[in-house]
Amino acid sequence: MTNPPPLSTGAGRFAPSPSGELHVGNLRTALLAWLFARSTRRAFLVRMEDLDRVSPGADRIQLADLAAIGLDWDGPVLYQSRRTDVYTSAITRLTGAGLTYECFCTRREIREAASAPHPDPASGIDGSYPGTCRNLSESEIATRRAAGRPSALRLRAQVDTWTVEDEFAGTVTGAVDDVVLRRNDGVAAYNLAVVVDDAAQGIDQVVRGDDLLSSAPRQAYLGALLDLPAVRYAHVPLALGRAGQRLAKRDGAVTLGDLAARGRSAEQVLDGLAVSLELAAPGELAAPGEGVTPRLLLDRFDPRRLPRVPWIVEPADL
């Protein structure tokens, strides 16, 4: 899908994991990413972050759902699974600078170490890696290898914190730990891939859920180590279920397919998303004969007036 050439040199993006159908919270974030990009005359790109769990055919369904609510994008969709060599090159560069080390910890060991008392937050509290394998001796490494323990590759961070700018949260200084760069199955880790791909695609505007805000300082620091351009973030409030938990299938009809089975059109769902973003009053845009489109919403879009609280999804309202 194509658009006239953008007036800005930057780009925004939506980057789902093709592990299943998008729910209305995902679609709302995609709509916001599109509105942020188009309102600033940036290109809008779609990337499939398919390095982890993948459901066959989910990417096609996700792209169809984005198109169904009227979103368009520039250029081909990028698939991370096809970019192994690019990630390997970045890891080689960091390793050559002495900024990586092998980690033999299991997830359980990390959880137990992180939950133990620590003298300061940077040593493991709030999910940070406590540095268990950071200073292993050669003999200790050899012993673990001989025992057949697989190793991941971690960043040897040189700072404890890093500061980023966010459209919603303002100036945010967050913890930086020794993030995984390559998993113990040999696949590039999310934090590395997202940083490398954003730079490669010219993305300078990242709009995503605020559950990822704590990842931004780590990713920005990694980008700085790789001499990549900085990005500006907008971490938007999530869509939640009635009980205040992350939205999921258990909350009822929350995908376009589910809602279509109940007789709800993609246009009506878009209307519900617009209401949730306070871009319209209930029923205002779904009048007979009036097509609801992202372009119509773009004329009303002002980031300063967006809700700052989570959207509690009531499927009956969509």
Image (cartoon, rainbow, N blue to C red):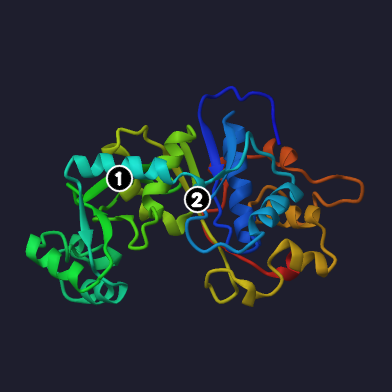
Q: CA distance from mark 2 to mark 1?
A: 16 Å
Q: Where does residue 109 sit, x and y in percent of width and height?
A: 25, 75
Pick the quarter of the image with the C terminus.
Answer: bottom right
Give the x, y percent position of residue 70.
74, 45
Q: What label sits on residue 19 in the rendered view?
A: none
Identify which amino acid the numbered label 1 is placed on: Ile
Determine which residue is flagged by label 2.
81
Query: Which sits in the foreground, 101 or 278?
Result: 101
Q: Name which residue lies at 51% across and 56% down.
A: 237
Is the residue marked by circle 1 packed among few (<14), some (14-19), or many (20+) residues within 10 Å?
A: many
Q: Secondary structure at mark 1?
A: helix
In the image, 239 versus 196, the foreground residue is 196
Q: Nearer the viewer, residue 8 or 152?
A: 152
In the foreground, 278 or 254:
254
Q: State the residue position of label 1.
A: 91
Q: Position of residue 243 (x, y in %)?
A: 56, 77
Q: From what the image shows, is residue 233 above or below residue 43?
A: below
* Residue at the extreme right of the image, as rendered: 289
